[in-house]
Amino acid sequence: MPNMSLHKNPMPVQEPDVRNRNFNEVALGYTEEQAVDEAERCLNCKHKPCVSGCPVAIDIPAFIQKVKEKDFEAAYEVLNRSTSLPAVCGRVCPQETQCECKCVRGIKGEPVAIGRLERFVADYHMAHNTKDAQIPKPNGHKVAVIGAGPSGLTCAGDLAKLGYAVTVFEALHLAGGVLVYGIPQFRLPKEIVRKEIENLKAIGVKIETNMVIGKVLSIDELFENGYEAVFIGSGAGLPRFMKIPGENLKGVYSANEFLTRVNLMKAYQQGSNTPIQNARKVAVVGGGNVAMDAARCAKRLGAETVYIVYRRSEAEMPARLEEVEHAKEEGIIFKVLTNPTEITGDEHKFVNGMRCVKMELGEPDASGRRSPVEKKGSDFTLDVDCVIMSIGTSPNPLIRNTTKGLDTNRHGCIITEEETGLTSREGVYAGGDAVTGAATVILAMGAGKKAAQSIDEYIKNK
Amino acid sequence: EEWWDMYKIVKKKSLNPTVSFMEIDAPFIAKKAEPGQFIILRVDENGERIPLTIADFDREKGTVTIIYQIVGATTKKLDSLNEGDSLQDFVGPLGVPSHTEGLKRVAVIGGGVGCAIAYPIAKKLHQSNAVVHSVVGFRTKDLVILEDEFAAVSDELIIKTDDGTYGTKGLVTDALKQLIERGEQYDEVIAIGPLVMMKFVARLTKEYGIKTTVSMNPIMIDGTGMCGGCRLTVGGETKFACVDGPDFDGHLVDFDEAMERSSMYRDFEKHHYEAACHLFDKA
Ligand SMILES: Cc1cc2nc3c(=O)[nH]c(=O)nc-3n(C[C@H](O)[C@H](O)[C@H](O)COP(=O)(O)OP(=O)(O)OC[C@H]3O[C@@H](n4cnc5c(N)ncnc54)[C@H](O)[C@@H]3O)c2cc1C
Ligand SMILES: Cc1cc2nc3c(=O)[nH]c(=O)nc-3n(C[C@H](O)[C@H](O)[C@H](O)COP(=O)(O)OP(=O)(O)OC[C@H]3O[C@@H](n4cnc5c(N)ncnc54)[C@H](O)[C@@H]3O)c2cc1C
Ligand code: SF4
Ligand code: SF4
Ligand code: FES
């Protein structure tokens, strides 16, 4: 008899007033009992509606069935067939708009907590697995992957499993992409990313850090070096600014800079050599996941007041609901329908305030979104000493500027064939944020997966 | 083929009490490096990422030379390493190479450790048969670096010290002004050194309408255009020094803003420098 409770097993979490002062993971994960109890809520639907919501088509009822049977390693095997980073996706996927929103249990009550179960299984495997990875039989072909974010790592992992000799070239000193430099420790412990990457290395994937492709080697030179195909998963890391006065004052960061200082360079730890401002009052401009992460990091670094400043209303915020709720619980103050017009500084050019205007939502525009319009005479000043701009990023121009014949659109995104990930250059494939602009981990992984299949076909048929 | 994974120090020497020279094993970077480009390094696992200019490179030997001034915690830690030791990370070549094509007569102005950045450009100009006048300035005699190297690639070399203990007393701008007043015609002036120095060189050459290139050195992290921390205002537009530069038109750079931004972490750095010194004193 399935568990007919209308509610998900709640996720155990650190208390808000405790966690907003440390960088440990907020969500603590299910116990075995909770996991099995939650798995019992799954009806094992024949037509598997949930699977259609998952960009990498995990066989959701099959892995949940194994959880019911307490055969967690078998559950892991099911996950492993479709995703190479289950511990990551279980944590950061926007499940509410993907797999879980298609779950029949969500029609009346809450859907099955698919993400939490996925995380449980992946964590169980990490803690208990003692089997050595099986090294696939080499097929004698070499493929290069640019960027060690989720798209590149997935593509590399899938190709390695097919016997390809894969080298991943990563610009930074650490592999992981946004998973290590952007998403903070308290949402995605770096240890987990590191272990997932160790798993890839164990099956033979080579990761060469400190290699900025386009500078140290071009794509053409990769081919000259014997790589038969190239996958570009270079992400969308170029930060946008608002172009308002005062943006170059001391104390104005892009979210990327702020998060990189905190996460990649560990500025939150005592004794780190990388400095970060000791801000008291912080305004984070933007309403996405990135903005929530920056705000919650600022709070944890000791800021007394942290604002989220967003020009539309809360309903339009692109951030995941769970992140917004967590942020609020931790004491982040939301200033919605508010738009910055100028950042002001003191005589030493440190930020001392941000001028804002109130907004209201006007008529829907061509895209159907109601665009915000300024309320006349509503301007006011927020008392802040730090401003973090989190209004979006676009693909870095480095690769497109150094690769002849690689077509990009007017946003700088690489143009690919929908079905295969093939770019305008033979043998060159691309996926993830570099193609779509800033999106999600699982979409990037899906693209890496698809490209790995196409590359395999391309090389086999050459 | 096998990848190297160690950035080994193959040669180290002290150029003056605060400036050292290191040749690093980095074959892939050596193959691509051009004057004006830089690398970013980390000394150890928890180290800060710092940018240093590629002062020279040897494509055959596969080495890259850096010349650094010991100013803070990271450069101090770097200087504690010796020949045979390896660096944790070494990435490059970053930035756009200096534009030297078509230049026939050039004044190269270097200040302090900026001379290390200016030297490879002077050398390249000399190799392409341009007339090179070099003006290099230092605070005092003990700090003079690369004198022989500059002499070898310059048609005229003027050395200035603030206190007159070597060369002639005064500022590099004084010497440049004299050259211009003497009737020298330059296609371009290339000035590399402290921000104040570049600001005043640019102010001077603007009066005479001589195109001037400066090399900007804001605080950087990734060096790939990802963080925006290295941004500058150039001609009213925001530029990222690591990917758009580090060379910019000196007449368009907002130097005052750049000077303010470079002092962002002064207190933090001072504290860490003292901590690093303390650590080495104990060792
Ligand atoms: C703060 C933050 C929070 C987020 N939160 C979530 C979330 O909760 N859920 C979710 O699903 N998504 C989230 N995202 C989005 C998600 O992280 C990205 O969509 C995803 O990481 C994209 O993967 P990718 O592989 O395309 O690129 P990236 O993860 O950006 O990786 C690209 C890699 O390529 C490297 N690279 C770039 N250029 C070069 C070059 N020339 N040579 C060599 N290497 C290069 C980069 O250094 C980087 O390591 C978040 C993003 C941010 C910034
Ligand atoms: C493109 C570029 C090329 C450079 N080339 C050379 C060179 O050839 N030789 C040389 O001696 N110096 C060079 N510098 C400056 C060098 O990077 C700094 O001296 C070094 O980072 C100081 O680090 P520190 O920890 O020892 O000192 P700190 O005490 O941390 O800082 C001292 C000063 O160095 C600057 N600085 C600190 N951190 C950084 C950083 N991450 N990026 C840039 N500047 C920083 C700041 O202005 C600071 O006030 C260059 C800088 C840039 C941006
Ligand atoms: S990968 Fe993401 S979308 Fe797919 S099942 Fe897991 S949580 Fe759902
Ligand atoms: S839709 Fe929901 S209940 Fe049905 S199989 Fe998928 S997870 Fe289970
Ligand atoms: S150093 Fe990060 S963008 Fe230039």
Image (cartoon, coloured by chain):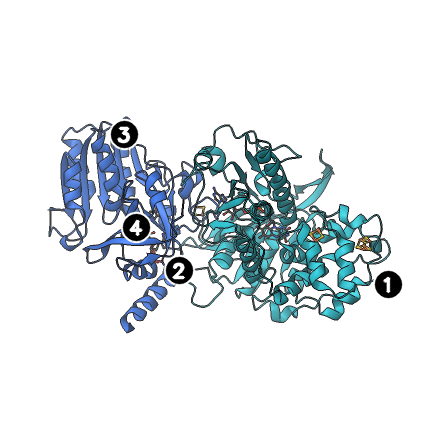
Q: Helix, strand or loop at disc 3?
A: loop
Q: Is residue B8 above or below residue A220?
A: below
| Colour given to chain B in the rendered image | blue
Q: Write down the residue under mark 2.
A: B47
Q: Helix, strand or loop at disc 1?
A: loop
Q: Residues within 10 Å of mark 3 (few under 14, many from 20)?
A: few
Mark 3 or 2: in front is 2
Asked if badges 3 and 2 are on one and the same chain, I answer yes
Q: Where does residue A338 sit, x and y in percent of width and height?
A: 63, 49
Asked if badges 4 and 1 are on one and the same chain, I answer no
Question: How many dots with numbers?
Answer: 4
Chain letter for the part of the structure drawn in cyan: A
Q: Earlier in the sequence, mark 4 or mark 2?
A: 4
Q: Write down the residue under mark 1.
A: A2
Instruction: Give the quarter the ligand 4 occupies.
Output: bottom right
Asked if badges 3 and 4 are on one and the same chain, I answer yes
- Residue at point 54%, 40% (across, down): A232
Q: Residues within 10 Å of mark 4 (few under 14, many from 20)?
A: many
- Residue at point 22%, 57% (across, down): B18
Task: Name the image quarter holding the C terminus of chain A.
Answer: top right
Q: Which quarter of the figure has residue B131? A: top left
C-alpha gap between disc 2 and disc 1: 53 Å
Q: Helix, strand or loop at disc 2?
A: loop
C-alpha gap between disc 4 and disc 1: 65 Å
Q: Residues within 10 Å of mark 2 (few under 14, many from 20)?
A: many
Chain of the residue on which disc 1 is drawn: A
Residue B24 image label: 4
Q: Amino acid at mark 1?
A: Pro
